[in-house]
Image (spheres, rainbow, N blue to C red):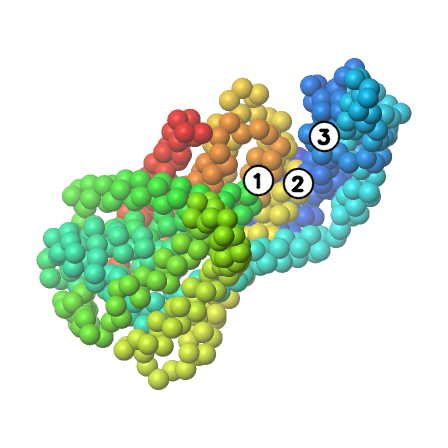
Amino acid sequence: MHPLLILLVGMIVVLAGIVYFRWHPFLSLIAAALAIAVLTSPPALLNNELRESATRVNAEDLDGDALTPNAIASKKLSPDSYHVLRGLASDQEIKPVGVVRIVTRDFDATDADSVPGVVGAGSIAIQPGDRLISIRDWASSNKRSQRGVGTRVAEGFGDTCRKIGILIAMAAIIGHCLLRSGGAQRIIQTACSLVGDSRASVGFVASGFVLGIPVFFDTVFYLLIPLAKALYRRTGANYLLYVMSIVVGATMAHSLVPPTPGPLLVASELKIDLGVAIKAGLTVGVICTIAGYLFAWISNRRWSVVPELDEETDVNTPSESVGDLPPLWLSLLPILLPLILLASGANWQALIDAGSGAKQANAASWTSSVLEFASDKNIALTISAAVALMLLAVSPRRDKTPLSQHVQQALADAGSIILITAAGGALGQVIRETGIAGVLVDMMPTRGAGVLVLFVAFFVTMMIRFVQGSATVAMITAVGIIAPMATSMTLPFHPVYLFLAIGCGSKPLPWMNDSGFWVIGRLSGMTPGETLKSFSATLTVMGFVGFIATLIGAMRWP
């Protein structure tokens, strides 16, 4: 079956499971992964394995019908015997057409015609487009192509857990501690006090963006919506602007700024340095946030939403007692620390080399080892979670509940998110194994393929988000398709632009299958129609603006 048709079947299973059968997203994603795995034939699996592990031969790599020494060296082909594969196609049985042997040539310094390196010799004339794979890797690829359906789905599930399980757990602890300690309230109060009631919406945007990095989007909205209602009761206007400012601030950090799990995994799969990903995500995130705020401001002027306020909505909610809240620097530390540690991974060696003389070599080496250790994403989030627990321990607002119970509650909240995200990872893995990336690459025109892959990344992510609802799952699933495409072609720009295209693609077209849609509608008091007009429209505008900014950046600053 054609990979595109298999993908369509999988998306139908997800959509039917969530919308029609009302399944939990975890069950829908696993069901779709199983369906795609069943429909993918062993030859398609082998073809996908070979596309990733076999070395492609181009016309410039050949001297007649043999490999040149420079080609063998540049492709890092070690001395060994290699199968020659020709005419790979996902629906055909793959068989080697011959064997080529790569041997080491002895270098004679006294012989002017002697060239150091390796040369190829074999039983078949190599042609452009052929692929070479060592006999050992050929046996391994054949074995992997015979894995059962359950094994393949479980491997994708487990691999995603390995990559993001600790990250989501630590992010949940950080968010829980910020909420229970009053650190999040301190950040919000400071932002709102700096701008005043007349510009409270700007304060919501700023605080939402900062909190959206370590705290899940739904939690940020739950935290800020009482303040929006209180301000509306006091001013009697701009309620829609207050609500959408919270959304605008928190949503882009959720999809663009590591160490949020979704963008962190996408950056890892695309092999992008986290320091670069953080800087690019912050830049495009700010652009999207400004665009979203302007759209929310225009929407607020064109139509209004009147919430149902109960007696518990206190007009004095924003002005909570300052003495009950931790200091601002300590409240911000669990948020800024992982950003600093992750970003330092790109620059620590240059900084040490610049500030270290010959006599300081040992100290520089020790410092570099410490920074390298701390800049690992799992270690950075663990350190930040420890700081967040310290914030909760010293907070004047802490109750008598032991810290261990707070951790247990945070991990309970994270468990469901880990399961859903890992199920999305399993879906992305089996989609990848269909060979759809190779099909899409083959369909692309030679000219302009680099820019075209950005469109593919954006729209594939957008459609997956539309089908199953979760932005994080959409990013994880899409990168399983896009990453092989990026590795099989020469991109005319930095791969961070693919990272941005996937992040922006996870924003448009949220609707009733998105849990955030219902959280925002119910907590704000908006009807589903009003939520579509405001929340869905705003996120769609932000996603497209971010993608346009990504395209401009890829063409102007590749």
Foreground pick, 452 / 83 = 83
Q: Do tag 3 and tag 2 residues touch (Cβ < 8 Å)?
A: no
Q: Which residue is mark 3?
A: 73
- Residue 102 screen position, x and y as percent: 82, 31
Above or below 74: residue 299: below
How many numbered badges does the structure rendering display? 3
Image quarter (top left, top right, bottom left or bottom right) of the C terminus? top left
Secondary structure category for the residue under label 1 = helix
| Amino acid at circle 2 | Thr
Residue at 77% in and 36% down:
78
Q: Which mark is residue 434?
A: 2
Q: Decide if residue 123 is on the left or right side of residue 517.
A: right
Q: Which residue is mark 1?
A: 483
The answer to whether residue 9 shows anywhere in this view is no
Image quarter (top left, top right, bottom left or bottom right) of the N terminus? top right
| Amino acid at circle 1 | Ala
Q: CA distance from mark 1 to mark 2?
A: 14 Å
- Residue 175 screen position, x and y as percent: 38, 65
Q: CA distance from mark 1 to mark 3?
A: 25 Å
Mark 3 or mark 2: name the one nearer the start of the chain: 3
